[in-house]
Image: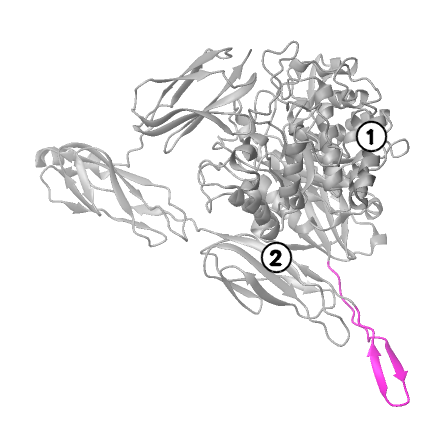
Amino acid sequence: MKNVHAKLVVSLFFCLTCYLPFSFSQSTANNMVRPYSEIFQYGSNMAGNSNGWTDTSIASIISKAGGHTLRPTLPETFVDKWGYPIRLNEFKYYTNNLGIKEITCFIQSPSTAHVDKTIFPGCTQSSKLFANLYQPIWNTDGTVNTNNYYANYVYKLLQTYGPYVRFWEVVNEPDYTTANPDNWLTRAPYPSESLNTQAPIYYYIRTLRITWEVVKKFRPDAYVTTGGIGYSQYLDAILRYTDNPSDGSVSTSYPNKGGAYFDVLSYHCYPAFTLRVWDNSIGGFKNTRNSDFAATKIIDAKNSMQNGLTKYGYDGATYPKKHFIITETNISRRTKEWRYGSDTMQRNFGMKALVLAQKNNIKQLYFYGVGESINAPSQTTVVTGGDDYKLMGLYENLLRDVPGSEKLTQLGKGQKTLSGFLYGFVYDSVRTKALSLPANVEGGAFAKNGQYVYVLWAKNPLDQSETFSATYSFPSTLNISNLLRSEWDYSTSGTTTKQGPLNINLTASPSFFRPETTVVVTPATTTTITTTTTTATATALKSQTITFIPTPDKVYTSPAFNLQASSSSGLPVSFKKISGSVTIAGSTVTITSIGTVIIEASQAGNTSYSAAKAIRDTFVIAKAPQTINFSAITNKIYGSAPFALQATASSNLTVSYTVISGPASVSGNTVTLKGTGKITIRATQGGNSYYLGATPVSQSFSVLSSATTARSSATSAAVAQPLIIAPSEIKLQTNPNPFTSDATVQFQVVETGKTSVNITDLQGKVLGTLFNGIAQAGVINKARISSEGLTPGMYFIRLITGTKFVSQKIILLK
């Protein structure tokens, strides 16, 4: 405390303007946690830049899927190499162009010059935290000590990105471990057990303290949060120890335990691992693998964390309570081992998790991740390796689909629907209580400016099923006569039906209900004001609001459609285009090109009503799909004249042809025969600015040596079918696996062509390239993996050709 007092005195001596922020940095979360009044944010983690995707295009499709915030990272290894403003334009784009706000940014990964090279007991590699953590944070004049590398890193980030980031998240998953976390309830985690820090927990608490002091001095409106904790046992240790590097004990220099240095708890929850419990009565596990049970697990995890906080006084009485955000959650849409998954289960889980998070005062929820990285196999396929994590996303495979051709998963469609109805609405606990929901119905009421949206679903008790129903009636005390009902896919279907308030059939998928109200216009109240010279009449105008039904995304060939908006006054709503390639006549929209469209609905008012606040709707016009019709080719006789191919695209764009196999050449649409045998020709249409590329179609035929042979083959030629080649699987193998030092990757491709083999982390970030060039079909290729620079854990080997994507999980042990 003596050092703190000295700093305060010096700060006061230099200038009064320094005093307020500097003294605030010395307060802690034991004294004050800034209230958080922003509306609930729908978020997504970012994705790696590949296949044409950039940070801005990734953020754009997050926004397109109903997301309003995102979770990037700014590691020092990156900003130190390329300069701190390297992503500033992107952050400005997120906020200014997309309206994305309340961003969570996780910070970590010191540069080579700033990493702590200490190898702590039990570890086989050096720390992953910053060196010089225990240098003074502040100079005597209140400026940041540049010799404290981490403090200077945080300070420089704040100076550059401070206006765009609300939550500063300290080290992603500091408790990632292969050890038993229950041991941490009675002792500190060993450095070797903390795989993402490789340092004592006291050093992690030190990073929290530094972040707190620097952030609260320079951006007091921002929040400091733990880095996506997965274990309440690790939180317990943070709350028991200080940043004392010796043993985490309280001392004059280290007066506060870890809870003093964060005001938000960020946690991660992947509930697929917790959907079964041991049942002694059956001598085995009882499974409840469905979206309802999975969604409740994120609340169970929050309650477990809060119990730990309450245990150490963070209950709103002894110390202020902390805010909660979830920065990673999801379930796979395919089964792995006993962990069941399906498209419907993933979609229902995501929508229910978003509703329950708001009901339980969680401020943000971020899905992992924005897009998948493999093609989804059939529903009955049981995936292996890390493919379950690769099938978590708002969009299908982004390593397959380039910008403009992305396809929403059911989860993405569900989030877009829910966000379209609920964003800006606030969970209303009183109104929800008035719903008197029975035990087999879940959901809630959400309110905004006197309007209500009800989200309801049947609470499912079944294992490996999303088929369940329940009947519900709105209480008569709510005075609801008719309802407008929409389902989970409204964002793409645009379908709304009318529903009475009684005996409503609910399914295991969330449904949305909005009361259909009748507006009664009454004469406005007038007041007469008399003076000696004039008589004037003043009118007290009534307020009105606009309800603008979200427009589903369209494609270039979509027909003209009508916008749906109404005012609470019953007065007609006007529409105007803010941006995008459409024309508007009245409420009818005609598409002229692709891209993002923003339309504003307004109502100017009249003598009884004041003008309504304008409402904007954003939707995307994507490239249209197209198909190819390729006529069958009859068998030919060698020596026949060149002939024309007959194929057309539904887009009317020109079709291209390629000889896949056999003795022939093609120029334009004309085929010239070069010999006898089987010939396969593929028709393709790559698309343009308005159309996606079509799925290629192949036709096969035979070239015969004579007319006699032709006659003998006439019958079979008449029923000839296009040749479908079923190539053998690409081979990819790593030995040894697990490995401790070096390993060899062997791979073999089916078709000669450009091939790349990379090693990536669990987030899909490419850590190294093992092969990049032309691989010959059928040839066994070898590449070497070195463990140098890698930390123990799980990685993926990823092989990509022009048409195939294969991956394999590998584990490094040291």
Q: Is residue 338 left or right of residue 252?
A: left
Q: Is residue 400 left or right of residue 105?
A: left
**Disc 1 packing (10 Å; few <14; some 14–19; many ≥20):** few
Mark on residue 617? Answer: 2
User: Which residue is denoted by mark 1 in the rendering?
Assistant: 4
Q: Amino acid at mark 2?
A: Asp
**Which callout, 1 or 2, points to the residue nearer the camera?**
1
Please tell me in which quadrant of the rendered image residue 638 appears.
top left
Q: Is residue 743 left or right of residue 130?
A: left
Q: Name the image quarter holding the N terminus.
A: top right
Tell me if residue 474 is in the magenta stretch. no
Q: Residue furthest front?
A: 13
Q: Nearer the viewer, residue 655 or 698?
A: 655
Q: Secondary structure at mark 2?
A: strand
Mark on residue 155? Answer: none
Q: Residue furthest bottom?
A: 533
Tell me if residue 533 is in the magenta stretch. yes
Q: Secondary structure at mark 1?
A: helix
Query: What residue is at 90 percent from the left and 33 percent from the top?
Result: 317
CA–CA distance between discs 1 and 2?
A: 52 Å
Please tell me in which quadrant of the rendered image residue 197 appears.
top right
Q: How is the image coloured?
A: one colour
Q: Specify start and end residues of the magenta stretch as a single range.
A: 516-542
- Whichever of labels 1 and 2 marks the residue nearer the N terminus, that label is 1
Query: What residue is at 69 percent from the left and 31 percent from the top?
Result: 145
Location of residue 45 with respect to 235 vertically, above or below: below
The dominant secondary structure in magenta is loop
Location of residue 580 with respect to 537 vertically, above or below: above
**For the residues bearing labels 1 and 2, Cβ distance under 8 angstroms:** no
On the image, the x and y values in percent for residue 260 come to: 81, 29
Query: What residue is at 82 percent from the left and 75 percent from the top?
Result: 524
On the image, the x and y values in percent for residue 174 come to: 67, 24
